[in-house]
């Protein structure tokens, strides 16, 4: 799109982009002031770096490998409840990590359902803690993401290709090799790179299922250096390593992230003649059954145990829940104030230029930004007193890359379809936003706001770094209950947290869609 003769200007976007860059650079400055390369790392820090890379690679490879049969089965089967299952595949992404961990413990933990079944069969129990537990949790979170990406790609294949393959009487294997393998080769590298980046900055999973000298991630090592040793130099140096790893991987992911689009055809419904055999039906059924069970059983266990534990929930949980709502509300407001002008600025430029500014959040982890800001704030004010505000702002920055990916296409489409008319009517600035852009992009804006609110309300990152007993959010309070072995109260808190996360997402998403239709 041309940069001239646009009905909106990029001035507000430039201000928003400058603020985002400044926020991240200030964190880098704080880290740089305390990082002492001469101090070096010990064996524990190098082990944390190795563990971070190994668990990220394993999580990415296993997630995309398991997603292939599940996405393929969903693409060629029209079963009852298929659309509901695809919708539920989005749930783990907004599910608070600490809630999901509680559900995984109920299913795969020492006293979980799987070990109970193993005991009945006379098999030895399995442990969920350590490398396999961290990888298991990451696969739980990222398998749906990989499946959705692959499914979207499969659905973009024109129906005419499968019709032609049926007319040529090609076997299922030949269809897979000639039509589907090229699609996988285009999508899988980007999906794996994206999951690798997400797992690199994982904190809550490593905190609850990792730990110990052999299962500590860089994020967890930063937290331990900060909270237990108050070694700001070590925390800063670890943050630099985290930045190099995550930033490099984020740039790689952005280069090869899948750009999925329709490849022609006449939009006919896809019919899969290659999936009518008994073996194909059985394989697809097994893939869907195992995938749905793996993803839904932990959620089911959280609901059941949470209902039982609700009467045991202490008053501190409800106070923490109100605090979490406040933090999530501030995060959404900050996100909208930054994302909308930034998205408008990006939309009037060609792809790949200023869009990189909004993606800085992918290269900086919450703990790294929190550590940098703490170092800068500490000499002039009490960082603990600002813990909730810092948490809200950092959560908004972390959600910004996802929000821009959601909102920018809607604004760009509105400008492409109505930009000339706006210029003809001399409609510019806020008037264009009010009457042209916002009504058309409102569903995407509501989705982004709901996603931000849900991610913020379930975050257990920066608040764990700053918090004191008087200032705590619901995820942190729930983690404290788990640490105190108050299992039933923690389960009740998990159910409250789950309901709040889903509720805030649904309210923004559905509310925006409803308002856009009226």
Image (cartoon, grey):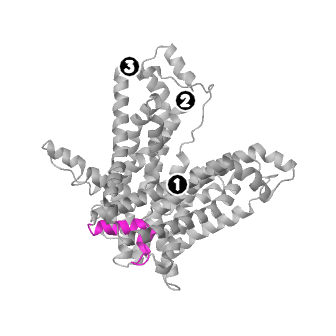
Which label was assigned to residue 505? 1
Is 383 left or right of 448, judged from the image as shown?
left
Estimate the x, y position of residue 306 in percent, counting from the top left: 34, 57
Which marked residue is nearer to the observer: mark 1 or mark 3?
1
Q: Is residue 380 above or below residue 84?
A: below
Q: Position of residue 292 (x, y in %)?
A: 37, 40
- Of discs 3 and 2, which sits in the foreground? 3
Label 2 and label 1: CA atoms lie apart by 31 Å
Q: Residues within 10 Å of mark 1 (few under 14, many from 20)?
A: many
Q: Which residue is mark 2?
A: 157
Work out whether residue 291 or residue 133 is closer to the camera in this orientation and state it.
291
Mark toward the start of the polypeptide (2 vs 1): 2
Do we see residue 273 in this rendering?
yes
Q: Secondary structure at mark 1?
A: helix
Horizontal side of 275 relative to 104 (left or right) equals right
Indicate which disc, 1 or 3, sits on the residue closer to the N terminus: 3
Identify the image quadrant of residue 200: bottom left
- Mark 3, secondary structure of its residue: loop
Question: In the rendered image, which residue does mark 3 sit on?
Answer: 277
- x 37%, y 52%: residue: 138
Marks 1 and 3, how far apart in space? 41 Å
Q: Most prominent secondary structure in the magenta stretch?
A: helix
- Residue at image position (77%, 52%) is 435
Residue plotted at (69% across, 50% down): 411
Determine contact: label 2, label 1, CB under 8 Å: no
Q: CA distance from mark 3 to mark 2?
A: 21 Å
Magenta stretch: give its range.
461-485
Residue reaching furthest left? 122
Percent x, y of residue 151: 49, 36
- Residue 109: percent from left, percent from top: 25, 54
| 511 up-or-down from 210: above or below | above
How crowded pointer 2 is (Cα within 10 Å; few <14, some 14-19, many 20+) is rated as many
């Amino acid at each position: 799109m041309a940069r001239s003769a646009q009905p909106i200007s990029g001035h507000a976007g430039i201000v928003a982009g400058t603020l985002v860059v400044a926020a991240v650079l200030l964190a880098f400055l704080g880290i740089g002031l305390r990082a002492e390369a001469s101090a070096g790392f010990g064996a524990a820090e190098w082990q944390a770096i190795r563990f971070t890379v190994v668990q990220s690679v394993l999580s990415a490879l296993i997630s995309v490998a398991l997603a292939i049969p599940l996405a393929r089965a969903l693409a060629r089967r029209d079963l009852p409840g298929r659309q509901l299952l695809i919708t539920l595949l989005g749930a783990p992404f907004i599910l608070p990590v600490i809630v999901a961990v509680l559900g995984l413990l109920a299913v795969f933990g020492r006293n979980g359902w799987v070990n109970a079944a193993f005991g009945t069969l006379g098999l030895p129990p399995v442990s969920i803690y350590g490398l396999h537990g961290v990888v298991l949790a990451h696969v739980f979170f990222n398998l749906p993401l990989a499946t959705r990406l692959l499914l979207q790609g499969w659905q973009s294949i024109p129906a005419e290709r499968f019709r032609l393959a049926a007319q040529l009487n090609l076997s299922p294997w030949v269809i897979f090799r000639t039509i589907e393998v090229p699609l996988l080769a285009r999508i899988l590298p980007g999906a794996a790179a994206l999951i690798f980046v997400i797992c690199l900055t994982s904190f809550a999973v490593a905190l609850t299922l990792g730990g110990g000298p052999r299962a500590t991630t860089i994020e967890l090592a930063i937290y331990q250096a900060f909270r237990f040793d108050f070694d700001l130099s070590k925390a800063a140096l670890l943050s630099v390593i985290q930045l190099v790893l995550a930033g490099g991987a984020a740039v790689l992911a952005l280069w090869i992230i899948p750009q999925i689009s329709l490849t022609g055809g006449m939009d006919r419904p896809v019919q899969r003649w290659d999936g009518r055999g008994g073996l194909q039906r059985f394989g697809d059924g097994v893939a869907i059954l195992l995938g749905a069970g793996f993803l839904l059983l932990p959620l089911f266990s959280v609901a059941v145990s949470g209902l039982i534990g609700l009467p045991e929930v202490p008053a501190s949980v409800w106070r923490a829940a109100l605090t979490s709502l406040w933090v999530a509300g501030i995060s959404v407001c900050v996100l909208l104030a930054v994302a909308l002008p930034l998205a408008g600025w990006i939309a009037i430029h060609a792809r790949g230029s200023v869009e990189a500014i909004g993606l800085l959040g992918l290269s900086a982890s919450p703990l790294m930004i929190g550590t940098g800001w703490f170092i800068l704030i500490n000499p002039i004010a009490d960082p603990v007193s600002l813990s909730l505000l810092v948490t809200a702002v950092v959560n908004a920055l972390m959600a910004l890359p996802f929000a821009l990916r959601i909102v920018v296409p809607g604004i760009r489409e509105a400008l492409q379809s109505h930009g000339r008319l706006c210029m003809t009517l001399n409609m510019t600035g806020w008037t264009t936003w009010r009457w042209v852009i916002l009504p058309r992009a409102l569903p995407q804006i509501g989705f982004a706001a709901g996603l931000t609110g849900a991610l913020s309300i379930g975050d257990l990152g920066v608040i764990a770094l700053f918090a004191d007993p008087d200032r705590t959010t619901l995820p942190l309070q729930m983690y404290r209950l788990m640490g105190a072995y108050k299992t039933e109260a923690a389960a009740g808190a998990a159910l409250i947290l789950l309901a709040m996360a889903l509720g805030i997402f649904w309210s923004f998403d559905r509310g925006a869609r409803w308002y856009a239709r009226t």
